């Protein structure tokens, strides 16, 4: 369902449609759109998950201050994580992927961490995992690294 206005927008040229993809789904925007405006225009409200508890996040601002619309752009050797969708100009063939979820954006297994939120206050990982010391390198640190973070680093060298 499109929520796109049929007219308006000083920078948008509706005579020049552009194809792009978000999480493998083919979508269409217009020349002059940002990735965020094209996603909202196509009804894609959910664009990411929160850092700690994986709560659903959507676009709430239109500039570089937007905290939720961080995406990965490109693929293979031209992949770049943590790009702001609100400042990325749409172009033909743009490939964007949401971040910080598994297996999918709509159905994220990471939400189970919100069930444990009362046991995970701010700074819990600095105070809780100090003992036994030998567990840090092989148990605690790998588990924390898997559950936290946003975009994944590229798997291949830059093209």
Image (spheres, rainbow, N blue to C red):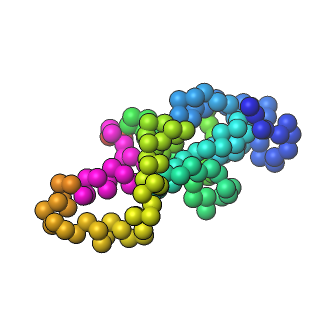
Q: Is residue 130 magenta?
A: no
| Residue at the spot 51% in from the left edge and 54% down from the top edge | 50
| Residue at the spot 77% in from the left edge and 46% down from the top edge | 11
| Residue at the spot 25% in from the left edge and 58% down from the top edge | 141
Classify residue 3 as left or right of residue 67.
Answer: right
Location of the N terminus (image quadrant): top right
Location of the C terminus (image quadrant): top left
Classify residue 1 as left or right of residue 8.
Answer: left
Res. 69 visible in picture: no
Asked whether 132 or 144 is in front, the reply is 132
Using the rendered view, name the quadrant where residue 120 is placed: bottom left
Res. 28 visible in picture: yes
Classify residue 9 as left or right of residue 26.
Answer: right
Asked whether 59 or 52 is in front, the reply is 52
Residue 17: give x, y in percent of width and height: 72, 30
Residue 46: give x, y in percent of width and height: 61, 44
Classify residue 132 as left or right of residue 61.
Answer: left
- What are the residue bounds of the magenta stretch? 140-156
Residue 114: give x, y in percent of width and height: 47, 55
82 in relation to 65, above or below: above
Q: Is residue 146 magenta?
A: yes
Residue 108: give x, y in percent of width and height: 48, 42
């Amino acid at each position: 369902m499109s929520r796109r206005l049929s007219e308006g927008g000083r920078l948008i040229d509706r005579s020049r449609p552009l194809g792009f993809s978000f999480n493998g789904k083919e979508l269409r925007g217009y020349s002059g759109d940002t990735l965020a405006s094209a996603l909202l225009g196509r009804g894609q409200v959910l664009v990411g998950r929160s850092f700690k508890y994986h709560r659903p996040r959507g676009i709430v601002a239109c500039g570089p201050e937007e905290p939720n619309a961080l995406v990965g752009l490109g693929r293979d050797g031209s992949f770049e994580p943590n790009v702001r969708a609100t400042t990325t100009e749409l172009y033909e063939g743009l490939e964007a992927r949401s971040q910080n979820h598994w297996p999918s954006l709509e159905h994220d297994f990471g939400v189970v961490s919100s069930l444990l939120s009362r046991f995970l206050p701010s700074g819990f990982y600095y105070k809780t995992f100090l003992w036994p010391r030998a567990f840090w390198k092989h148990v605690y640190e790998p588990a924390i690294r898997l559950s936290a973070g946003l975009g994944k680093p590229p798997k291949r060298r830059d093209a």
